[in-house]
Amino acid sequence: MPASSHGRGCSAVSRISLLFLVLSAALWGCGDRPLGTGVVLWSPDESLLRSASVVSVLSQSEITDTYRVSADELAEPLDIERWRVELHDDADRARTRASEFASALEGNPSLHARATRSALPVRSEPRAAAGNTIYRLRENEEVKLIGRQPEETDLEGLVSYWYEAMTATGERGWVFGYTLRLFDPTDDTVVVETGRGADPLIDLLLQNVWRPVYYLDMIASRAFDLELFRPEFGLFPQPENRQLELVLPYHATIFEYEQIAPAGSRRYVAEGTSLQITFQRNDELNLRYTLEGRQYILAMQRVPGDIEQFIENEIERRSAVYERLLERGPELGSDAYGSLTLMPNQQFAWTGFQRLVPTAIGPQALSTGRIDMGLYLSSALRRDYDGALAFRFDGEQTPASFVYQLLEGGIRFVWVAPQNIRDRIVQSVGVSPLTVFMSAVTE
């Protein structure tokens, strides 16, 4: 509620009015005096209000984290997220900032950019230095450009501008433009393509994230081992630092090279390191290197799509499959093999399973554990079974793996020996498999 014309501000006249005033103040502040002058860094709608516009900031809301702004081009005040606006106490300074903003981007303050590779660092200052990375962009992640250094920088042969950028989460920092694609969203015009070196294969190496070849195998088979299929595994070039960061499930290292130099047909060396790189074809390369006295040879490929999205989809799939199991329970029982309770978050409790020890269940198994839904059926088994899973008992390292059928009134589990599972895919169940039928327990 705004202050009165007699200047009494937000004084209370009763408990009810005081409560109303407090809520109003929390929502939009108190008083008619504007908070200051703002510069719109990232407009939510360029057709309504252009980036680099100077606006009067009328009030703010702590609850919705927004400013209420007005401008000549607006028919009425507009609520806009605070991170999109740079607030100034001095109107002249705000106008100067808006002018600098527009001129730094050559008169086009609407410019956006997309990262052309994963893990592109956003830095606290326009230089490549250890410890100044504040954020990493995903491949194709969009940022709003809000500034640019006046001169291009040469980072060991990679020539581009340093751009000041803002992410959709409000992070602000500097990105080297070598691996950015600049565009104007108002007409989808590509303004600047990323820098290019003299050797297209070196460009290909440095502008992409490379993953172990098993990533593509898992995507093709739709059989994901989420311990091995993770966004942090791969070869991550950092050309601005002259580094190639390799992170794998079993080790990680950073190759700090002097330059990437040709060493034969489609073969290169990262000088100053043990790393040799051979291109098999444009989307596959072999790495050869020595680490702690041991030599490694590793095949890597570019992987289309978003790794995190693949993981999210797989987690959702597993949850949906588990829900189908819960529909047959959650209480299941067998006269011979005990009582099984399926619980939320893929947890279980199983008592009375002693007849399955040690053939199917290890001798150290306790009565609780977690169900691993990351097993898959081979094509030959899909006709006869609905799925596969593993009971990971607390206290026991070896999981108890089963394929299963969803039947009227219960679930039939068929034990699978470890040697019949390859790459988390059940290949067969053997000649005379151990079978456990658990019927639904009804009250």
Image (cartoon, grey):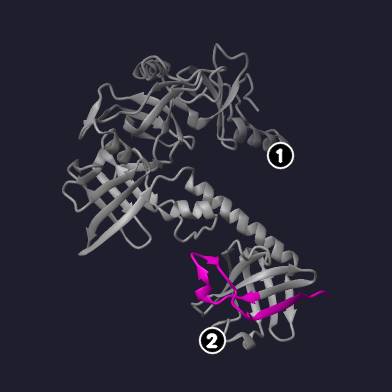
Q: Nearer the viewer, residue 274 or 35?
A: 274
In which quadrant will I find the N terminus? Answer: top right
Magenta segment, which residues? 414-443
What is the spatial separation of the Cα atoms under label 1 and label 2, in whole angstroms?
69 Å
Mark 1 and mark 2 lie on one chain; the one further toward the N terminus is: 1
**Counting other residues with Cα less than 10 Å from the Cα at mark 1, is it few (<14), some (14-19), or many (20 or more)?**
few
Q: Is residue 196 magenta?
A: no
Q: Residues within 10 Å of mark 2 (few under 14, many from 20)?
A: some
The residue nearer to you, when weighing 219 against 244, is 219
Q: Secondary structure at mark 2?
A: loop
Amino acid carrying mark 1 in the image: Arg
Residue where numbered disc 2 is placed: 363
Question: Mark 1 — residue?
Answer: 15
297, above or below 116, in the image: below
Quarter-of-image position of residue 121: top left
Q: x%, y% of residue 10?
A: 62, 30
Viewer-nearest of discs 1 and 2: 2
Task: Specify the quadrant that holds the C terminus.
Answer: bottom right
Secondary structure at numbered mark 1? helix
Q: Is residue 129 visible?
A: no
Decide if residue 36 is on the left or right side of residue 279: right
Q: In the figure, 102 relative to 31: above or below?
A: above
Q: Residue 288 placed where, x, y %?
A: 25, 54
Which amino acid type corresponds to the residue marked 2 in the rendered image?
Answer: Pro
The answer to which image quadrant residue 350 occupies is: bottom right
